[in-house]
């Protein structure tokens, strides 16, 4: 007979959402364990843009003040994208670009050391036929039985698959990201620059006075399947696509940090799937990209994950701690908390995914003129204030 280790709350995935959720629970006095498949904490994605709603969540997590010291305040936007991007960001709100590793490490530092299990990969999840508790089978043959399972395992989420959610879909575009370090300091202004040429979009944003984050959005090709793990090939293909852009931009990409080049196909979860499919089953749920993967067009993926963490921890604490001060978790109370979280977050994530999807369609080369026109009309009708997504407040932890 197999013997299972028992835990109250298990978080699958040690990225931004997983660590934020563990930290939020810790702030509420609730312990958890985070299963991260990598041998070290992941910082994939180079940098992350945090908008006002994201900073409100970081304030609640208690790490915002420390992170603000690592990133300058962006005070302006300069765009040549026909006004599209210019309209999506609140120029009066707090906008900063964080190095993803800074965010990950800062949250991890405030989590108890025995919370995160590195090199721990989940193979499958099922429900115990007697208790309906989730049972996780791990790569080393061990079994973990939990009262609560939170899937923060990204766009290819096994937890989302268990819940019956449809697989994420691909845009025909991809994004290349990187850093350029200037040992003597750079001379760029504290602005978010976006420039377009034909079907290529380039973005640049300083992180601090010596480090600059950049990205290039372009069409995904079959050749990218062969180069996406080789930084030299990624750099060469990116430079090839940047012909016609100003020399200073091309040189910046050419001289960027070798280990910072990341090529990512853009995946999304269709808004209609979010409306039709539940994000929870019993005491199993998803959060972050596992639930609401979007393209980077609103720069809200990370901030929305932080919001999830705050709301989820608040719902669990409200339904558990006040009734069971001993820390014991009763299934019925957990289900109430999980349903409350899903209910509170659903329309917010549907709105974000819908707005991001429509923008992605407008920028996608594979989209017909008619569909682009329909997307423009729907965007105007549904999102009269295109910056409203930054006004959201996830509330107090």
Image (tube, helix red, strand yellow):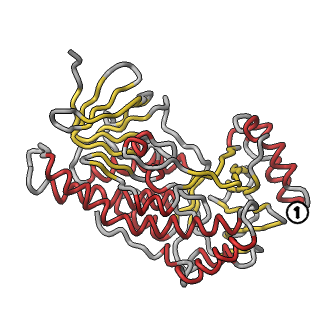
Q: Quadrant of the C terminus?
A: bottom left
Q: Position of residue 370 (x, y in %)?
A: 72, 73
- At horizontal 70% and vertical 52% (from top left) the residue drawn is 174
- At horizontal 62% and vertical 51% (from top left) the residue drawn is 170
Q: SS class of the residue under badge 1?
A: loop
Q: How many marks?
A: 1
Front in this rendered view, residue 126 or 26:
126
Instruction: Classify residue 112 as left or right of residue 217.
Output: left
Q: Position of residue 381 (x, y in %)?
A: 55, 83
**Alpha-carbon neighbours of circle 1 within 10 Å: few (<14), some, or many (≥20)?**
few
Front in this rendered view, residue 117 or 164:
164
Vertical order, 189 against 11 (above or below): below
Instruction: Classify residue 7 as left or right of residue 391.
Output: left
Q: Position of residue 265 (x, y in %)?
A: 66, 48
Quarter location, residue 210: bottom right
Does residue 179 show up? no
Front in this rendered view, residue 73 or 58:
58
Quarter location, residue 122: top left
Does residue 347 show up? yes
Q: Residue furthest top?
A: 1
Vertical order, 187 against 137 (above or below): below
Instruction: Classify residue 141 as left or right of residue 305.
Output: left
Q: Position of residue 131 (x, y in %)?
A: 16, 36
Vertical order, 177 against 393 (above or below): above
Q: Quadrant of the N terminus?
A: top left
- Residue identifier under label 1: 246
Quarter location, residue 13: top left
């Amino acid at each position: 007979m197999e013997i299972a280790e028992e835990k109250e709350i298990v978080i699958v995935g040690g990225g931004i959402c997983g660590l934020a959720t563990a930290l939020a629970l810790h702030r509420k006095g609730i312990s958890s364990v985070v299963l991260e498949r990598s041998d070290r904490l992941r910082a994939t994605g180079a940098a992350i843009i945090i908008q006002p709603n994201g900073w409100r969540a970081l304030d609640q997590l208690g790490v915002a003040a420390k992170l603000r010291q690592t990133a300058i305040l962006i005070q302006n936007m300069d765009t040549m994208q026909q006004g599209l991007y210019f309209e999506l960001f609140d120029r009066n709100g707090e906008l900063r670009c964080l190095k993803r590793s800074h965010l990950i490490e800062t949250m991890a530092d405030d989590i108890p050391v025995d919370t995160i299990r590195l090199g721990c990969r989940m193979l499958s999840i099922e429900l115990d036929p007697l208790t309906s508790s989730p049972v996780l089978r791990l790569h080393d043959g061990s079994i973990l039985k939990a009262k609560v399972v939170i899937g923060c395992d990204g766009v290819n989420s096994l937890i989302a698959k268990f819940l019956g959610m449809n697989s994420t879909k691909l845009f025909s575009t991809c994004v290349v990201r990187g850093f350029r370090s200037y040992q003597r300091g750079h001379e760029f202004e504290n602005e978010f620059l976006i420039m377009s040429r034909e079907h290529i979009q380039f973005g640049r944003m300083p992180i601090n006075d010596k480090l600059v984050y950049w990205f290039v959005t372009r069409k995904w090709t079959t050749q990218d399947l062969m180069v996406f793990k080789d930084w030299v090939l990624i750099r060469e293909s990116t430079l090839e696509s940047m012909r016609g852009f100003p020399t200073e931009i091309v040189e910046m990409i050419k001289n960027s940090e070798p280990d910072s080049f990341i090529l990512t196909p853009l995946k999304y979860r269709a808004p209609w799937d979010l409306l039709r499919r539940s994000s929870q089953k019993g005491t199993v749920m998803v959060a972050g990209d596992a639930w609401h993967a979007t393209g980077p067009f609103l720069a809200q993926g990370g901030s929305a994950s932080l919001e999830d963490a705050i709301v989820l921890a608040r719902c669990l604490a409200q339904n558990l701690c006040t009734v069971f001060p001993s820390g014991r978790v009763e299934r019925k109370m957990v289900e109430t908390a999980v349903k409350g979280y899903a209910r509170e977050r659903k329309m917010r994530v549907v709105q974000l995914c819908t707005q991001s999807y429509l923008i992605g369609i407008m920028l996608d080369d594979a989209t017909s003129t008619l569909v682009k026109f329909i997307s423009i009309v729907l965007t105007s009708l549904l999102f009269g204030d295109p910056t409203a997504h930054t006004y959201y407040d996830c509330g107090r932890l």
